[in-house]
Image (spheres, coloured by chain):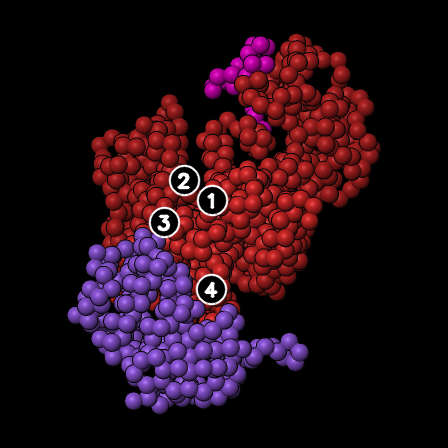
Chain colours: A purple, B red
Amino acid sequence: MRILKVEGLTKKYGKGESEIIALDNVDFNVNKGEFVAIVGQSGSGKSTLLHLLGGVDRPTSGEVYIDDTNIYSLDENELAILRRRKVGFVFQFYNLIPVLTAKENIEMPVLLDNKIPDRKYLNELFEILRLNDRRQHLPSELSGGQQQRVSIGRALANKPSIILADEPTGNLDTKNSKEIMELLKYSVKKYNQTLILITHDLNIAKMADRIITLSDGKIISDEVIKQ
Amino acid sequence: MKSYRQLTEKYLKEHKKRTALTLLGIILAIALFSSIGTLYYSWKDAVIKDIKSRGNYEVMYSEVSGDKVKSIVKNAEVSNSGLIENCGDWRIVNGQAKDSILTISNYDENALNNIFNISIKEGRFPQNNNEIIVETKFTNELKETLIGKEITVEMKTLNPKETSNNKEKKFIIVGSYDSKVSIKGNTYTALGYFNKKIDNQNMYNIYVNLKGSRNKVSTAIKIAQDNSLHTSDNNNQINYNDALLRMYGESQNSELRKDMKQFIFFISIIIIICTIAVIYNSFSISVVERSKHFGMLRAIGATPKQIKNLVFKEAAIMGAIAIPLGVITGYLGLYIIIKLISDFNFNGLGSFKLGIYPKVFFICIGLGAITIFLSVRGPARLASKVSPIDAIRNSKNIKKEKIKIRRMKIIKKLFGVEGELSYKNIRRNPKEFWVTIFSLVVSLVMFIVLTNMISVAKQVDTFDIRQKYYDSSINSSSDKERFSPELLEKIKKLDGVEEVYTPIIESRNTAIEGDKLSEKYFKQIGKNGGLAKIPNSNFVILNHVTIGAYDSNSLDKAKKHLLEGRVDEKQLDDNGVLLVQRKKIIKEGRETYEDFTKYKVGDKITVPAFKHMTSVIASSPEEATRNWLGQLIKNNEVNTFTVIGILDSEPISGIRDNESISLIFSESIYTKITGEINHNGAYIKFRNQKYRESLNGYFEDLCASDKYLSYMDYYKEKEGLYLGLIFYYTFIAVIALVAIVNIINTININLLVKKREFGIYKAIGMTGKQFAKLVILEGTLYGIIAAVVGTIVGTVLTLALIDGRNVNMGVLMNFNIGLLICGVVGVILVTFLASLMPLRKLNKVNIVESLRMEE
């Protein structure tokens, strides 16, 4: 079942001679539960693509459909709510809120929805993410790996349809990187979520079901690794 | 760039807005110092000038024999002196001015020119013993040319010089002068010739200015003691120009000196602390923001001292710009306020002029430099402690802050998730949080305390509320010719006169039933005398009881001062009386208000008849009074009145502190009990400023042509009050401005440095509305917290200060809730508005851009 459809997605910066085409007429679809890795050189447009998929940026032209909803037909508020409920972001530099504990950081998307967090689900998350003894710790009291796990927990808190991860292991050592990837894979499988991940690490890319390669803003290959 | 120090200028230019805001904070503070200093010294100079115009001396030694004069005048501590010889009162025995009295004194040259600055209006100064000059009031009233005329006078009062009671003298009037002191009635001042050869048998008054600027009183006493002058209370030969000495801070009243010094010290500390708050916050935030850059500099070889110097240099540049601007702004601001007041014809400022005082400038530089240095020390040290490795690691700002977990359930309940987040954000830097809160709290507390003090002072002043109901008064001093009814009618009909009050107020000794006096007061004033029991009765004598008759207009105003009962003319005409029984008394050196008697509305007051005392055999006036009143009581010659109302004061005459009661009757009852009704004056309220000014001239001319009439313009007395009010309100406004600058700066910077963080909120799904709520609350929570703290502190402080002045609680003091609400709303509004500015900026920032930002 298709969860994501991208049509003619283009992003340009600047005008005239200084115009930069970060993304050039990109088309692709993603099915529910798929693990897609997006790879490419620096400046190939990977992060731009991810940001556009998550609705944190607007394209110059083109459409993105999540669950058959054209996300760019939504206004800012609706887009924010979509990000909160349908999309989970994992950033390279964790981007946790420094004044909130691990628990509060994870719960934040649910709280923004004015809902009461599902304790059972969250406890499960803490278990999976191995953060039970770190719930009440501030980000400054956590290691890099722990912070990234909190970041993953936050992305999963509202049970989104899609997880978008921008170089989630980029700031971690090998051991932690491996751990994080296993966690991501496990959780998306458990909750039947779609994972789209940017990486420049081919080893991590090979863990995915499918690898999309970008170069100069265009898809140059779209390879299914695992069925 | 030639030196690493040029980094400072680059940073200042890069963050123009922040630099400008910090500069503004410093400028305001220095402006405050400058304006307070200039106002204080200008006011002081104006008052000193005014005092000196009436007599430029510090000490006067009275009745000093001629043989001691030289010793005093030549004393090493004496800077300059003037001599006056009192020649006594002389009655004119011939001519048009027959029976007029001349009070003749001889002034030496110094007394004429330096001490009293007497200038000849017409003619010349006397050159021999037979010549005198007279005050211009004398020549004006006689309406004839007196210069060159001879007059014959006979002694009216004993003068140590004269031995015969009926000595006659002839004087030639050679000139006229404007006297500083005017005596009503037919007594005039005159100046005779001063014989330069001091007569050892004569007595002189010596007016002296001392050399030293300190310890004038003790120096004056020493000079007196060295010359064997009397310095004890009963026969003190030393008289001080208290008004002048007070201005020099050399008043005998040490309480006053201490109060003034404490007040100025307190004000200065407040200003310094508020300014430190502004500068500290601004530098603190900017240092944190640039810690990566400082770390980089350290990584490439800068020493901690060099980093500190960068921050100090920044502060020095700001100081160099802001301090002179602040001094000029303070002076100009004050100049504009004074000019506006003068232009609007308040006329409340009289001869006050703004001066330029170099010492104010230097004090401002000093205080400004100290304030800036104290503020920047902390942030400079912080900057120097940033380690190179912190800069290199990207997550450095998370590690750097020592954040505490904060929970505030009440905030979450009131403001939701966004509120809780905001609260945690503002609390993450405790120093910055408390400094900002402190700055806001100080403003709010100042506002509450000072505005309440002003309103209490105004209430206390209502005990002397002449200015409240009328602008001036005209009175007759003649015993024989009272204020003519025709003149009264004429005044009432004058165009521009809005209201005329014609109370009759006089003081009598009478007696009341002793058990009606309050015990407390009875005990307290008992030792001061004036209280004596009338034998064979339960009456006690009360001296200086004010009895009065109020006209309808006066009774109308009396209603505003009603504590109990009613002001009803009909009831007053039916043997009713209005009682004033609340008096200000001094108890253990402090002021308090207490009820003098136990009378309540409906009670009967019985007093001896108000008949003039006929001859009574007695050994003293007190005994005569007691015998006379005793006689009246024994013969049942008493009057009984019903208390129909109790007032807090006499609203028209404003008489107070008689340590006695006041009985106010209607005119008909007054006539009945005293047998006569003669108005001796009128109190006038003008329709507006224009009429007041034009009619003042009319009344002054009227009095000039009638020696028994005198006119007083109470409006002029408001000079000091206006200046005081300008000072208070300007001070409050500027302190509030300093706090506003601080809060704008702090909120602005705090929000803008967290662009990346705010990007995260949006990225994880915060809607625009939720985001706006978060940002606004980050600012407004400062205001709400400061409002809570400031309300408590301000209220407690106000109540304590008012109570400390011993005003009877609940009687005079009304804590003004309205002012409190204004202050609270103001604080919250300011913080709310301060957060709207950065919100607009933050809304424009793209999520992706903010996420990519380095912090």
Foreground mark, 1 or 2, reads 1
Label 4 – label 3 distance at C-alpha: 20 Å
Label 3 secondary element: loop
Q: Is residue B496 above or below residue B723?
A: below
- The foreground one among B624 and B307 is B307
Q: Residue furthest left?
A: A120
Identify the amino acid type marked 3.
Answer: Lys
Marker disc for residue B657: 2
Residue range (magenta): B221-242
Establish if B539 lies above or below A180: above
Sequence-earlier tag: 2 or 4? 2
Which residue has dot 4 on it?
A: B755
From the viewer's perspective, is residue B266 above or below residue A167? above
Q: Residue at x 56, y 79 (%)?
A: A21
Look at mark 1 in the image and give the residue it sits on: B387
Dot in front, 2 or 4:
4
Q: Where is residue B747 drawn, in percent x and y? A: 46, 59
Neighbourhood count class around disc 3 (C-alpha, 10 Å): few under 14, some 14–19, many 20 upward: some
The local secondary structure at tag 4 comes to helix
Which mark identifies residue B402?
Answer: 3
For the question of whether residue A117 can be seen, the reply is: yes
**Does the segment drawn in magenta span residue B225?**
yes
Q: Say whether residue B62 is visible.
A: no
Amino acid of disc 1: Ser
Mark 1: secondary structure: loop
- Mark 2 surroundings: few (<14), some (14-19) or many (≥20) residues within 10 A: few
Along the polypeptide, which appears first: circle 1 or circle 2?
Answer: 1
Residue at (62%, 39%) from the top-left corner?
B365
